[in-house]
Image: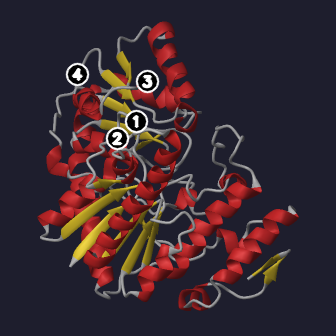
Amino acid sequence: MKVCVGLNSVASIIPEIKSSFEKQGIATITVSRVESQSVLINNEIDFCIPTWKARCPVFRPGRFYVRFKKWWDKKVESFIWNKVLNECDIFIFIVLSFKDDFSDLEELVKRGKKIFFVFVGDDVRWYYAMKSEFSLYNLHPVEYGIDGIDSIQTLRSRLARIRIAEKYATAIFSRLDQAQLQLRPYYRWNMMVIPENYNVVLNQRKKNPVIIHAPSNRSIKGTKYILDAINRIQNIDKIEITFRLVENIAHSEALLMYESADIVIDQLLLPGTGKLATEALAMGKVVLSNMSYEKYPQKNPAECPVIDVNPDTIYDVLKKIIIDFEFRSSHAALGRKYVETYLDVALFCSKVLDLATGKHIEYDYIPNFFRDCYNSDNSDEVQAINHWTDFIKDTDWYKTFVKPGSRGDFIF
């Protein structure tokens, strides 16, 4: 048995999945269609398609080079595709598959391959559906620019990814905060780590604690609210702290900064946590993030040690935690065990192997927001949604979990 993992290494997760599979004796090939420019991303991939394409020799005259380059690019894609097709039995797709239109999923199914599709965020999140759902739970709206994310073309691209994956995948992994368009029952996707790769440093500073925030996107992470809270604590309350905003440094350097921290703040707007929180917990840090425990039904484990904050509470909660040294010291010790119990990459790999061999595992979520709640008076949106709903109606899971009928202009 061999596994192919690709094709977008969000938060450096692909190399970690490969490492975990291989520790379990499962050979793994990793592929990426994206050469990340972020210094926080680990690009250790077996086949990075853009890098391989860049190996094409440059020569004159230019018109011949252009033709050769097109041939070369196709040759690279064909070589990698045929290699994984012939060698791999299980395919784990994160955000992307090999084809822009996801037509490779149908071909893989015809060849008896097992497919696991992972959604991670704005690859499937439709702004208006998210806004509508968040308002039902009285959650703070996510503050990122509308340009480019509210077009019908954007909706169509998200629906294509979701519905084709829902039709052909063996199983779907996703998160509640992004699943507003989803219909198929799915398993929870966590930002995971290999715990033993992280040093545990539990010694909290009684005075002048170090506070870290490392936003991948300032607007989405709610960075402006964090900076405002830090400013009030330092300049109005005159509490001595060291604050570090971690941006534009290599991941290895960032990890050293996390290791030296006492408190780590992840995100304030989207409910849940990202890779930063998982890494910090693995190191034994006090972690703050928007969890909305009492509002949003994410089904977090009862012992989750992440402290709930949002734009309205970050100042008060952070200030209290800074002052309460005894609480920080005891609470920090909870993180590593939580990661080992729930956020170890090995748990995901084992679940994939179990599902691939036909083991029944109860779903984490059976989505109903899209079927029962979402509304739209945009005729283009309705047409796109109905088209992609019709695409999956012949599946067994649809017949089991989606109630037939209509609601407004939507037809199910």
Q: Are marks 4 and 3 in contact (CB under 8 Å)?
A: no
- Mark sitting earlier along the chain (2/4): 2
Task: Name the residue that disc number 1 marks.
Answer: 38
Q: Are marks 2 and 4 in contact (CB under 8 Å)?
A: no
| Residue 41, numbered label | 2
Helix, strand or loop for disc 3? helix
For discs 4 and 1, the disc positioned in front in the rendered view: 1
Helix, strand or loop for disc 2? loop
Q: Residue at x 43, y 24 (%)?
A: 319
Q: Name the residue type under label 3.
A: Lys
Q: Nearer the viewer, residue 278 or 168?
A: 168
For discs 3 and 1, the disc positioned in front in the rendered view: 1
Task: Name the residue that disc number 3 marks.
Answer: 319
> Would residue 357 be found to the left or right of residue 98 on screen?
left
- Mark sitting earlier along the chain (4/3): 4
Q: Nearer the viewer, residue 260 or 12?
A: 12
Q: Residue at x 56, y 41 (%)?
A: 269
Quadrant position of residue 318: top left
> Where is 357 relative to 57, above or below?
below
